[in-house]
Image (cartoon, rainbow, N blue to C red):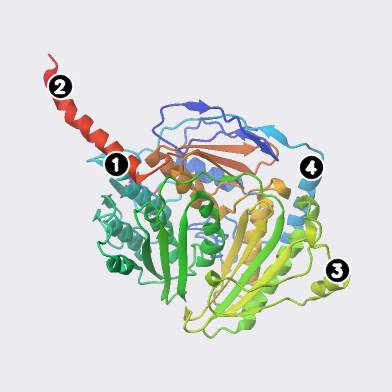
Amino acid sequence: AMIRLWSVGCGMGPFFSHQIPHTFRGASFSPIQVALSAPPHAVLRGFAASLHPCQNFVPGAGAGGGRGAGGPSGVQGKGKKKGGNKQRGRNPIKMKAEHAREVARHNSNQQHSFVAQPMATEQPGDGSSGVQSGGELVIDGSHGEGGGQVLRNTFALSALLRKPIRVESVRSGRKNPGLRHQHLTGLQLVNSLYNGTLTGGKVGSSMVAFHPRAIRDSPSSDSEREAEVYVADIGTAGSTGLLIQIALPTLIFAPRDITCELRGGTNAAMAPQVDYTLLVFKPIVERMGVKFDVNIERRGFFPRGGGALRLKAHHIAGPLQPIQLTERGQVTRVYIRSFVSGTIPVTVAERMSKTAKQLIRKYLSSSASGQGQGRVVNSVSTKAGSNKGKGKQRNTRNNDSDDEKEEEEGGDSEGGVQYEVDIVQETPQTAEGDGTGIIAVAYTSTGCILAGSALGERQKTAETVGKEAADSLVRDLMCAGAGSGGGCVDEYLQDQLVVFMALAAGTSRVRCGPLSLHTTTAIHFATLMTGAQFSVLQSASHSDVFMIECTGIGYTPQRITQQQQQESQQQQQEPQQQQQEP
């Protein structure tokens, strides 16, 4: 059945359509056609929720508030009871394995070589967003996801494009509406970088306006340049990872390398853990030309915060390169990092990693025929890199009965999955207070990286935390389609790539599972502010697999300067032309 969906764009006229003459091996993508009278944010919210086939049995898969329970933090979204959805009497891993085998049998009978279909879209806007008022572009802060992401994306693009904006109804649907400390700190950082004027910049504000200028000039002397560090201190356990999200797009286009010290929570709820940023986000955006380094000076957790990151963004000379993530390939390696800090014993980290590894391995083993990669081979562990943490590291191996059985049987590493597990006990020098967490990262033969993670809480067992991380990863591996025809990114990388795709020169293509509300919201505002053209295509063979395509604007600061000069000249010529008219 054809899905009819209100477009996430605006300002492109009543209708437009274009052919996409590209062939993707693995599936054909059908158009998502448009003709709906409901408001676009309501349509997109229902659309994203309806396409998640796993939410009935995977804990935290519901479309709650914030990043939701399946997010990098593993914390439940708003509106959901603690513990997520019930299992309904069935084993989730068993159900995932059954699904994978069914899809594998279906795929084995098909030849996958299809041409993508055209997509027709209607772009009427969302009512208040996009309206010009007093020289400011008005942004509806309640649109779509309606949270901090709207602020981060629109402020970053406002700074780069030098477009004044005014965001109204800031986080109006949240339990504590208006600006919070983390949001305000990010806005102040960008405002400081771009010599801007910030109005309404206080905690609790429901309206905030930003008038950017050019980025600050480089210090005159070498010593001043070396000492140039922008400090952004949230003052709470708010996420430093979200500060990276708002700052990074603006920093890479500066005429020089810039260093920022970000203080707050490094492993925070409802936000990407710093480990996700380093292990998943960083290597993917580097393929587009984004270069940055993050040094974890000290980890911080809820409720004390106290974490500190040192972000160094390297400037780029030209526009970003488009990215192509169109084939997932086979899972070849799984890396697990499990840590504890403060008074929490290291055995907690060991139990978290053991549970996560067992569940992930069980799923991959059961779906081996769908993956086309044989059975899982022996567990192997190596030391984590410098960015994976500075605590005391134990390179461990879970010597359970399955591992011992595999040792006796041997194994073919050419067709298997390599497992690497790091158990880390943070020290008082590397972490502030008590905290625990885990991230499980899957690497594929085509260079795709997907991850699931979770944080410990009081009254939550280590096994529960490990299971949440495993379920998050397995959900993306399965719900994005079994076998090599699945999605190339997890749910939480989708929306983080949208801004960079819009700024790149050329057409980017990202194959993914069900679109999150964060993703559709990010596409909406990227289209609104940049004019980049986005298309969303649905796979004909997998209803929960999509291709996001974007023809970016090829952004450079020089291009924006030229456009502003041309606009200024036109404005000066208009009065003269009016005087000359008879």
In this view, which residue lies farthest toward the top? 582
Q: Please name the amino acid that badge 4 sits on.
A: His
Badge 2 amino acid: Gln
Residue in front for this viewpoint, 257 or 553: 257
Task: In the displayed orientation, state which residue is furthest to the right.
Answer: 409
| Residue that badge 3 annotates | 410
Quarter of the figure that contains the N terminus: top right
Assign the magenta stretch its main secondary structure: strand
Q: Which residue is mark 1?
A: 561
Q: Label 2 belongs to which residue?
A: 578
Residue numbers of the magenta segment: 138-142
Going from the N terminus, do you reach mark 4 or mark 3 first? Answer: 4
The earlier-in-sequence mark between 3 and 1 is: 3
- Residue at disc 3, secondary structure: loop
Closer to viewer: mark 4 or mark 3: 3
The CA distance from mark 2 to mark 4 is 69 Å
Say the numbered circle drawn on residue 106: 4
Query: Residue type at mark 3?
Result: Gly
